[in-house]
Amino acid sequence: MTYAVRTSGPASPMLFERVPPLWWAIALVLIAMPLFASNFVLFQIFGWTFILGMIGLSLMFLAGYGGMVSLIQMTVAALAGYMVAILGTSGVPAISLGWPWWLHIPVAILVAALFGTLVGALAVRTEGIYTIMITLAIASAFFYFTRQNYGLFNGYTGFNNVLPPQLFGIDWRQPAPFYYLTLACATLAYAAVVYVARSPFGLALQGVRDNPRRMGALGFSVTAHRILAYTFASVIAAFGGILLVWQSAQVSPGTAGIPQVIDILVIAVVGGIKRPVGPFIGALIYVLLRVFSPDVLLAVGLSGERFKLLIGFGFLVIVFFSPDGVLGLWEKFKARRAQSRDPLRGDRP
Amino acid sequence: MTLADMPSATSRTAAERLGSVSSGNALELRGVTKLFGALAAISDVTLTVRPGERRAGLGTNGAGKTTLFNCGTGDFLPTTGTIRLFGEDVTSFPAHERIRRGLRRTYQISLLFGGLSVADNVYLACRGVSRGRFSLLRPRVNDVLVTRAAELIEAVHLTPARDTLVANLSYGQQRQLEIALALAGAPRFILFDEPAAGLSPTERSELVSILTNLPGHIGFIIIEHDMDVALRVAESVTMMHNGRIFKEGTPQEIENDAEVQELYLGGGSHG
């Protein structure tokens, strides 16, 4: 079913084509979630999952469609968060400019997109491992720069008390409103990536991934396509970054420290980097492990501080059994089920 | 028209601009050399092809035919020499700029987009030479390029496979798709790099009919080891040897040339 959607031509019907029942069920559960889930689950588990999923989605767009593994996505997100703190309001009035939300949010996204585009312009001159190294180098430079710069980034402490605007009289940091805010942003980002993947730009990007030399021989500028892919991905990461800063109400160098930068790669790879839904699955697994592994470890008599051990182990297990992440496992399972069906009658023995 | 005929610098630029719509050579290489380290893959090659001319490029393996194509399309730049396309100096142009000016090519080993369907591959080829390459909007069902892509797929007999992932196509189908990609947009001159390699006899005769039925204004150079294909579709022949132009002439002249027979057709090199 999903295969038919993926391989259909550009002429195929638009967005709501052939949505499988499973997706409708998931949508219903997600919309009704605040009726039965606790505030902790809404805010901490799902809010965080949607945010990390969006930042992972921006990496999935670059890696899955463009064949470029970038480690800059978390940094772009953090820069957008910093811009919201610097241009808007925060607990550091000496630096924050106090611009209204309708100005500081678009400018923050614009600055992050410009930064991502610049990094992309440097990174696309390289391939494979070198792209990873260049983006990692810039991410580390950003981390150390923000930690040492007090004039603009307020150094080691960063900014606290960075809150979402009180639009329509709603406190968007309350669990249910924040849940719906992140759900809406994540859905929009997901839909945008799915839609753009079948647009001329998205198709051309996949062409660049499969065969850059041939794309040149078809009249496409390979470099321009790769750089603009970074721009598009940066916009998604920037939205995620702003939500992340609103959720924790603070932004500091540690928001985009090296572990956080790597975590985004882990999330995208664990979920599955070939399809836009992968990073959200990866983010949910990551958040669940992050939140509950101290309890699990304590229950078996180990120190709760060793939660990274469980995360690393889970990552190893998934990548070992399926290089395509959880989505790859699911597809293997479906293929096996299809095989076990009776080849003539189509039903299972 | 050659460089020597052109009266002055100013009128030359004017002539160049006109050349792209009226007269001049389709493809003109002057003194083109390509070095890979110390190895000269082609040296001092001068070659002119008129618009609409159909030329066969012959030569043993390693004679420099594919390198000539790669310099022609800009897959890599020549070490020395100039390349003109419809009168315009394109020597330093990247591949995509030359393609947008009406040059096309196919590859000896199919270079396709394995992760996309046949329809997407051809649609991309059509989109590459028109506007809206960066469009974020999906094409409509009645989009002119979608229709054009469907026509091209029909022309190379791939309609039943239009939704198949290219990685799952048979070898012969991939070769047909190569040709469809080269015919997208408004091609004016095409470089075919061994299009018949690995095809069955039936597929070969289909290929010959596709090539002979191309509109008259589209010229091409075809590199081909199969003389049956090469000499049936070409009106002139360029023979290469060791990176240099060895002989030029009509198919009859080349076939009857003693040196050529010695070198290539008769296989007399070991006699």
Image (cartoon, coloured by chain):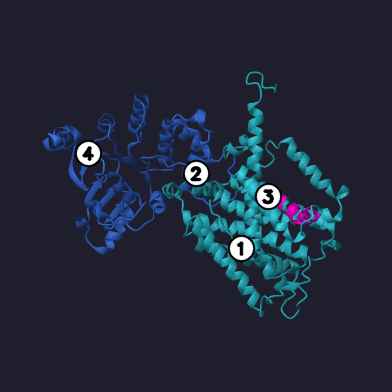
Q: Which residue is mark 3?
A: A314
Real-space Cα separation, disc 4 to disc 3, in angstroms: 64 Å
Q: Which residue is mark 2?
A: B124
For badge 1, the amino acid type reads: Ala
> Foreground mark, 4 or 3?
3
Q: Residues within 10 Å of mark 3 (few under 14, many from 20)?
A: some
Residue B203 seen by the camera: yes
Real-space Cα separation, disc 3 to disc 2, in angstroms: 40 Å
Q: Which residue is mark 4?
A: B237
Start and end of the magenta stretch?
A: A285-298
**Secondary structure under the numbered disc 4 in the rendered image:** strand
Q: Image height check: is A210 above or below B175?
A: below
Real-space Cα separation, disc 1 to disc 4, in angstroms: 54 Å
Q: Which residue is mark 1?
A: A113
For badge 3, the amino acid type reads: Gly
> Foreground mark, 1 or 4?
1
A108, B26: nearer the viewer: A108
Chain in blue, by letter, is B
Q: Quadrant of residue A12 in the image?
A: top right
Q: Earlier in the sequence, mark 2 or mark 4?
A: 2
- Label pair 4/3, CB-CB below 8 angstroms: no
Q: Image height check: is B251 above or below A130?
A: above
Tag 1 and tag 4 share a subunit: no
Real-space Cα separation, disc 2 to disc 4, in angstroms: 33 Å
A181, A56: nearer the viewer: A56
Q: Residue B96: image x %, image y %? A: 42, 52
Q: Residue A4: image x %, image y %? A: 61, 34
Q: Chain of mark 3?
A: A
**Secondary structure under the numbered disc 2 in the rendered image:** helix
For badge 4, the amino acid type reads: Val
- Label pair 1/4, CB-CB below 8 angstroms: no
